[in-house]
Amino acid sequence: DTGVSQNPRHKITKRGQNVTFRCDPISEHNRLYWYRQTLGQGPEFLTYFQNEAQLEKSRLLSDRFSAERPKGSFSTLEIQRTEQGDSAMYLCASSLVEIYNEQFFGPGTRLTVL
Amino acid sequence: GENVEQHPSTLSVQEGDSAVIKCTYSDSASNYFPWYKQELGKRPQLIIDIRSNVGEKKDQRIAVTLNKTAKHFSLHITETQPEDSAVYFCAATNRQGGKLIFGQGTELSVKP
């Protein structure tokens, strides 16, 4: 499968626990994006990287959220001290900036915080 | 701030009819407008996009129009089929490779 992949696909955790998600972009895509989607809503931007550099973070991204892309390939999104309001689908997308912003999405990680 | 409004939130049509979904954006610097289709439990999939230097783009039964002066763009699906049933999202961005601002989505139901 040469598309964007995300792991795990589902995560159930208790409030207060830390969780980490992984995204593997399409090979050679230099941009990687994280979005969050709640039921009945469009995806909301969280942050994005060009290669290793984190270029923008949303005001939605509290200090409990951190994202990395250490080698410019896969990325991780960590949520510390999870809250019930963090329950959502976390979507990753990637693009090749030379091709005008066509972003391709992964299947998402569905987080449920009990 | 940046905002994209999408209407209607739900749309029901008979198979073979046309469907139109409309979006407006607030940032006049927006210059790229993709449309995504999301089936239940699946990832958003890009179906068509348009850049600010053109007013219309067509791909088989799907077309998108852009009115930069009014800051709105629309998705047109002709000869709808039951497999077109899904949630459709419009989006906008104001720079190459930047974040997408999404509309709230339109749930399209095509009845056979």
Image (cartoon, coloured by chain):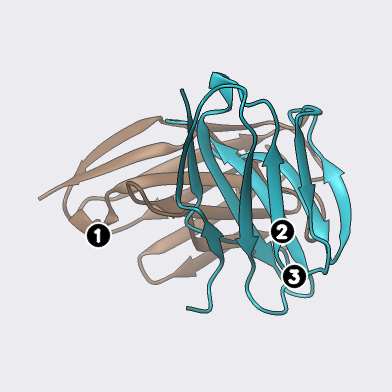
Q: Chain of mark 2?
A: A
Q: Secondary structure at mark 3?
A: loop
For label 1, the residue is B79
For label 2, the residue is A75
Q: Chain of mark 3?
A: A
- In the rendered view, would you say A42 is above or below B81? above
For label 3, the residue is A73
Q: How far across and down, in percent of the image, does residue B15 sit?
A: 16, 52
Quadrant placement of the N terminus of chain B: top right
For the residue marked with disc 3, what is the amino acid?
Ser
Horizontal relation, residue A83 to residue A64: left or right: left
Cα gap from disc 3 to disc 1, whole angstroms: 41 Å
Residue that appears at 50% across and 53% down: A8
Chain A drawn colour: cyan
Q: How far across and down, in percent of the image, does residue B78 sit?
A: 31, 58
Q: Are marks 2 and 3 in contact (CB under 8 Å)?
A: no
Residue nearer the viewer, B79 or B88: B88
Q: Residues within 10 Å of mark 1 (few under 14, many from 20)?
A: few
Residue nearer the viewer, B93 or A28: A28
Q: Secondary structure at mark 2?
A: strand
Horizontal relation, residue A16 to residue B68: left or right: left
Q: Chain of mark 1?
A: B
Q: Are marks 2 and 1 in contact (CB under 8 Å)?
A: no
Confirm whether residue B28 shows in the render.
yes
Horizontal relation, residue A19 to residue B79: left or right: right
Q: How far across and down, in percent of the image, does residue B48 sit?
A: 52, 63
Chain B drawn colour: brown
For the residue marked with disc 2, what is the amino acid?
Ser
Q: Secondary structure at mark 1?
A: loop
